[in-house]
Image (cartoon, rainbow, N blue to C red):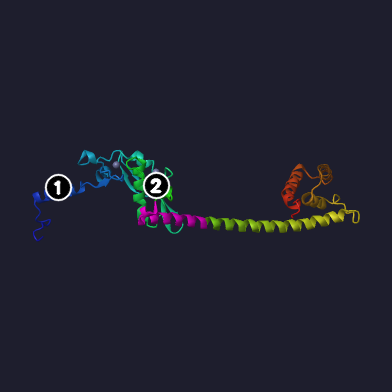
Amino acid sequence: MTDQPTLATLTEDQLADLIQAATAWRNQPSLRNCIYPGCLREFDMAARMNGREPARPSWSGDGWHQVGGVSPGHICPNHVDTVAAHLARPVDVPNGRWMVACACGWMSRPQTYGGLLRPLWEEHLLYAAGELTAPVTLAETPGRLPLPDHTETSLRELYDALEDTEHDRAETREAAQAMYKAWDWHRHTLAGAARAVTAVCNMMRTSSDFLDRRDWTADRIDAYLWAVLIGWDDEVLQEIAAKHRWNEHRVKYVREMRALLAPITDQPKEG
Ligand SMILES: [Zn+2]
Ligand SMILES: [Zn+2]
């Protein structure tokens, strides 16, 4: 490296060499593969981005697409349609596991190791494209394999299926318990509210009977309370509305409130 030219000693030829080397470096292809398994097509992304012709016609970027998801990368024009119908994303599942959810509706089995997602998706893609024939899996034919024919792998698959089922069942039970608790809380609260409101209504009815003879229509607030808590007959309500100058909105509101309370105050006696 001792005879490397400096600016002072640089000859015309050396300068030309340098420029040529720089140009060659800048024009170096930056090849990208098609993500479709087994596809050997590639295109020159550097040429594409710099807007120049690639060194080989087969490196043209025309018709290529870029995708993300489980298998980020580029798709060649031949495989754009197939891959577009099966764009997939990773999904979190319980137990610290992952699975692939495909746009077509297919889902992989849950996996502990995320690195399996892409190969599983690739396999699915090849099945979908008809390039591979899916074997009948054990999960689809439980118990069909005679015991001597089982291998370590086939047994593990069965145990995995069992584990998934058990986990799902535990989750379902937890959800059902949570719902039951919420329902039970509401049931008790509602029953308490019903008892309290009924106590008030009973007191109002008692005070209006022949001993007390309290007239609940005389005072506008009494009439209002009775209208909501116990309810007037339609005819009486019209009279009260006229007497206390309730407009149609107030009458409508009072009817609404009565309807809301009716399920609580008019409950059939339990037991
Ligand atoms: Zn391809
Ligand atoms: Zn799919």
- Please state the extent of the stretch shown in magenta in the rendering: 146-170
**Which of marks 2 and 1 precedes in the sequence?**
1
Type of residue at label 2? Ala
Mark 1 element type = helix
Q: Residue furthest bottom?
A: 2
Ligand number 1: quarter of image? top left
**Is the C-beta of the residue carrying label 2 under 8 Å from the nearest atom of ligand 2?**
yes
- Mark 1–mark 2 distance (CA, rounded to whole Å): 45 Å
- Is any part of residue 157 visible from this angle? yes
In x, y percent, where is residue 216?
A: 85, 51
In x, y percent, where is residue 203?
A: 82, 57
Between 141 and 32, the one lying in front of the other is: 141
Between 68 and 194, the one lying in front of the other is: 194
Q: Residue furthest right?
A: 211
Q: Residue at x 70, y 56 (%)?
A: 190
**Is the C-beta of the residue carrying label 1 under 8 Å from the nearest atom of ligand 1?**
no
Q: Residue at x 51, y 56 (%)?
A: 169
- Residue 158 part of the magenta segment: yes
2 over 59 or under it: above or below: below
Residue 20's disc number: 1
Residue 169's disc number: none
Figure quadrant of the N terminus:
bottom left
In x, y percent, where is residue 60?
A: 25, 40
- Is any part of residue 93 visible from this angle? no
Local crowd at mark 1 within 10 Å, few (<14), some, or many (≥20)?
few
Mark 2 element type = strand
In x, y percent, where is residue 50?
A: 26, 44
- Residue 221 part of the magenta segment: no
Residue labelled with disc 2: 88
Figure quadrant of the C terminus:
bottom right
Type of residue at label 1? Gln
